[in-house]
Structures are given as structure tokens and as C-alpha cells.
Amino acid sequence: MLTLKLIRDNKEFVIERLAIKNNNARTSVEKIIELDKLRKSFQNQSDNKLAELNKVSQKIGQLIKSGQKEQAEQAKQVTINLKEDTRRLTQQLSDTEKQLQEILITLPNLPHSSVPSGKSAKDNIIVRSGGPKITENENMLPHWDLAKKYDIIDFDLGNKITGTGFPVYKGKGAKFQRSLISFFLDEAIKAGFREVIPPFMVNPDSGFGTGQLPDKDGQMYYITFDNFYLIPTAEVPVTNIFRDVVLNESDFPVKYTAYTPCFRREAGSYGKDVRGLNRLHQFDKVEIVVIENPKNSYTQLETMVNYVESLVVKLCLPYRILKLCGGDMSFTSALTYDFEVYSEAQKRWLEVSSVSNFESFQANRLKLRYKDEVTKKNQLAHTLNGSALALPRVVAALLENNQTVNGIKIPDVLVPYTGFKLID
């Protein structure tokens, strides 16, 4: 959530930056400024009435002591009127603050100055690419055919048990999935991240804190009776560990990692892009979350991008890194890099990670602050996170790109985890 100070002091800048995200925010920003002025007016009037009430109340006691009963009764009537005025102003203040908050939470985060303009993924910029050379073998099978051939992932069985988008992993497929999770967690721990196992359900306050609510309400699975949401990513519970927390500067950077299943409704998804593992309603992911000092957050972002790149390199997958344009960025992000790996059977790029800096946007919602060592005042921290990695499309690419006449070759770094070199 953007701060009121930022909007008040930089009205035109905020409007211009949000236009990069294709958001016409002028009306909202001007309404916020208007309501903020009104809020201050009601607050000042209320404070003045309370001060006057206290003054008159003290005077009543003095009048009674001096025997001026008539004047005391008149003063009591004044206090009744002042109390009514104060009650009315308090209600007006509350209503104004509510209206202000309702508009404020609809504004997305400002994009970083380096974010390019654009309306869709077609306008994203390729930062760099790497990995093995892409081959053009027309005889390669897509992963959904390989899954059936080797009986490692059963989409029909998942559909029977639950529905579309909930596959069942079997035999070597299940072990392969578990091995990737362990590999990603072990690599994160080596890189200095602390592992946590968070809840897989969160309350509305947690969803609001990281910006999924109300923006992504329709995409999240909701448990009505308990008022809980199934998590769409470990980012939500892990970042909320620090809700209402004040850190010391010496605590930075705070680095956490977590494996969780992720649940997303993905309403409106259809076609070839959702076949097999390409888009699921339940999938596994290892997440990295960093809480950082604002002055170091963009250096930290580059460190996280380099770390995720190292994982893809170790898996020997062709990859590319993209800087997202304004029109393809999330509601909460200030700058995002996407990782895509190439699917040699599907002949297309598959997104496997997003690494983002949210600056103080989430921290403002979370009331996540740190004590500045110089000013001794509490300041908003910066939050960052990234997928390291999301499994479904990584699995799809590994199965497709490593298929041979004898079976599917396991990447060397995973053999110690799987205990086998070939899925056959």
C-alpha cells in the first residue's frame, strides 16, 4: 500500500508512475488527497472540541466550589453540546478514514524507474539467456505423453479424485518431485536462507498484508466456515511472520525459505497453455523471502536473481531472464524478473520463477518496520521474494528435454536425491 505522505507530496509523480502499469489513477489520487484534507479537518475540529470540553469541565468544578450554581448548570449544558459535537465529528472522522482506506488499497505499487512501458508479456525485455543449446527434434514427446508412457503422473486419476488441475504423482514421478523439493531447499539453506514450514492456510489479515487481498480474492480458494484462505504461495505466510514487527538494522537481511503446496483457482484459464503441468490448481513450490534495508534492497534483488539463475544452470535447462514491463507486473511489485525455461517438445518458453522487489508496499500493509540507527525512528522495511523454484513447469521441461530412447535421464545434481539415473 502506498503511503499517504508519498501521495500528498508527489501527486503527479504517483500518477505518472502508475500510468506505466496502465493504471489511470488521477481520479483516485485526487480523491485520496481530498479525503485526507477532510480527515485532518475533522481531526483538528475534534481535538479542539475535546480541549474546550476539558476546559469547561474544569470550570464547572470551580463554579460549584464558589457557589455559582446557576453558572455551573449553564456550563454543564455547554459540555452536553460539546460532547454531541465531538461524537458527531468522531463519526465523520471514522467514515472519512474508511473511505480513504477503501480507495488507498486499490492503488497498485509504483513501478521502479527502470521498468519499461508495455501492455502485455509481449513487451517484456529479455535481460539475458543461457543453458544448453536448444534443439529442434520433431520426435520429442510432450510431458503429458511421457507421464502416461512411464506411469509417473496421472492426470485422469487426479481429475477423478478432485478435478482438473490436481495431478497424482506416482512411483519415480513422486520421487522425482520430492527430490526437486529437497534439492531446492538444500540449495537455499546453503545460500543462507533459514527454512520454515508455515501453515498452508491463512487468515484475511495475512492475505491483506502481502497484497493478495482484496486484489486476488477471486483467484484464492476460500474456506467459508473458518474464514481461511488456502495459500497461493509461501510468500503469504512467510512474509506475515513479520507482520507488526520492528526489526533492528543489524537484523538485515532476514532470509527465509519454505516449501509449500500452492493453491490457485486460475479462473478463465484454458487451451494448450494449461495442458498437463503447464497450469495447475495445486502445485509445489520452494519460495525465498527477504526482508531488507531499503538502501540495499535492489542489490539484494540482483543477488536473488543470480541465485535463482544458479538453480536453473545446475538443472541444465535452456533459460532466459526477462524484466517485466509495466502492463505485465503484479499489483504489489515495484520490479520483477521472470525466469523461463524452454520446453523442447512444446516448442515454447515456460515461466518457472518470478523474483520481485516490493519496496515498502507490503511493509506498509504489514506494519513491518525497522529502527533507523541514525534517526532512532521506525521506518518501513523493504520486502522481496522469489520462486526458487516452482516445480510443475520445471518438471515438464526436465522430462521433455531429457528424454532418450532408453528413458528420461535425471540431471546429475538430482541423482543423489532420486537414487536413480533414469526414469524408464
Image (cartoon, rainbow, N blue to C red):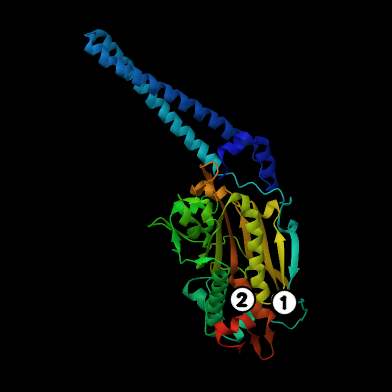
Residue 83, quarter of the rendered image: top left
Q: Is residue 297 visible?
A: yes
Residue displayed at 46% across by 28% down = 43
Residue displayed at 71% across by 64% down = 321
Q: Which part of the image, by quadrant, shows the N terminus?
A: top right
The disc placed on residue 333 is none
Q: Position of residue 342 (x, y in %)?
A: 71, 72
Residue displayed at 44% across by 61% down = 201
Q: Nearer the viewer, residue 17 or 270?
A: 17
Q: Position of residue 114 (x, y in %)?
A: 72, 51
Q: Nearer the viewer, residue 341 or 121?
A: 341
Q: Which part of the image, by quadrant, shows the C terminus?
A: bottom right
* Farthest bottom residue in view: 406
The disc placed on residue 395 is 2
Residue 289, quarter of the rendered image: bottom right
Q: Nearer the viewer, residue 69 or 260?
A: 69
Crowding near pointer 1: few (<14 within 10 Å), some, many (20+)? many
Q: Position of residue 291 (x, y in %)?
A: 55, 55
- Secondary structure, mark 2, is helix
Position of 370 relative to 348 (above/below): above
Q: Position of residue 51 (x, y in %)?
A: 39, 22
For marks 2 and 1, the one nearer the N-term is 1
Q: Which residue is mark 1?
A: 344
Position of 321 relative to 73 (above/below): below
Position of 82 relative to 212 (above/below): above
Q: How many marks do you count on the picture?
A: 2
Q: Is residue 81 left or right of residue 196?
A: left
Residue displayed at 41% across by 57% down = 224
Q: Amino acid at mark 2?
A: Val
